[in-house]
Image: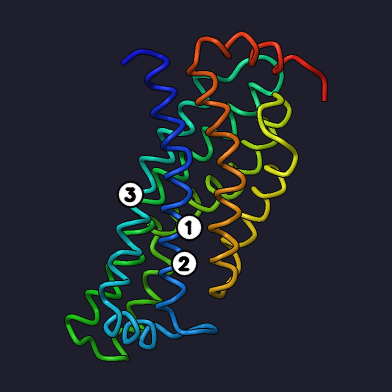
Amino acid sequence: MTRHTFLRTAALALVAGPLLFTLGDLLRRLVEPSGNPSAAELTHAVADHSTAWLWAGLLSVLAAPLFVTGVAGLVVDARGRGGRTTTVGAALVGLGGFASVGHAVAFYAPYAVYGRAATPDAALRALDDASGSYPLLVCLIALFVVGMMLGSIVLFVGLRRAGRVPLWSVVSAVVFVAAGSSGGVVAGLVGVLAAAVAFGPAAWSLARSATPATAGLERSEANLPL
């Protein structure tokens, strides 16, 4: 695969990954009962909407390799001012993307399995409490949160310093992170829109870099002061 082909592929992945991730999260919010549902309430809701829950998990898993491919393209194309910050942010997002696969399986699969097995409510509470302190799951959650949330902000600060995205992409990245850590369907919808507004220009900058006619122009733009 040539560099230009890889950058084009990474550009597509950089749009598709965040969109699939936020769409999966939106489906999750549509299934989950409002407020702070217990393990039993969530299990019953999943049993009633098993197809939507399955798709929510699948979209989350599919988003992970796309995220990793997209930010890998940004690392390959990082240069000049903001390049180091971009690389650090991309590495964090890539780490979060890897962790998100384990996080998705650990979150989506058990509640579906509990429902299929008709697990008693008392056992559900015990399993939920035990899983919340299991070291492997705690580690995956921590890597996922730090990578996807902190990493996204660092990434867009670097891209802005490089002159590759407008200021409103950085603001949208902050909204993307805030929506992901907030509850409710409305926050999920905001997350989808913020992902498109934030990652769209970043992907466009990669697509432009993949075009030889604009590569030289982008190299000059990257060295311009803010």
Task: Assign the C terminus to one quadrant of the image.
Answer: top right
Instruction: Determine whether 53 is above or below 150 in the image.
Output: below
> 110 above or below 212?
below
| Place of residue 28 in the rendered image (x, y in percent of width and height, measured from the top left) | 42, 70
Circles 2 and 3 in contact, beta carbons < 8 Å: no
Residue under pointer 2: 26
The Cα atoms of the two marked residues, 2 and 3, are separated by: 15 Å
Residue at 68% across / 51% down in the picture? 174
Taking the spot 31% from the left edge, 72% from the top edge, the residue there is 52
Residue 150, position as x, y percentages in the image: 62, 46
Q: Is residue 23 above or below residue 48?
A: above
Give, as a three-letter code, the residue at label 3: Leu
Mark 1: secondary structure: helix
Q: Sort mark 3 into few (<14), some (14-19) or many (20+) by Cα contacts within 10 Å.
A: some
User: Residue 225, percent across and down?
Assistant: 82, 20
- Picture layout, residue 69 above or below residue 188: above
Model colouring: rainbow
Q: Which sits earlier in the primary sequence, circle 2 or circle 3?
A: 2
Quarter of the picture holding the N terminus: top left
* Number of residues whose C-alpha sits closer than 10 Å to that of mark 2, classed few (under 14), some (14–19) or many (20 or more): many
- Residue sitting farthest toward the bottom: 121
Q: Taking 88 as reference, is 133 left or right?
A: left
The one of 63 and 217 positioned closer to us in this rendering: 217
Mark 1 and mark 2: span between their CA atoms?
6 Å
For label 3, the residue is: 62
Residue to which mark 1 is pinned: 22
Residues under labels 1 and 3: Cα distance?
Answer: 12 Å
**Are discs 1 and 2 less than 8 Å apart at CB?**
yes
The secondary element bearing badge 3 is classed as helix
Amino acid type at mark 1: Thr
Comparing 212 with 69, the one in front is: 212
Q: Residue furthest left?
A: 117
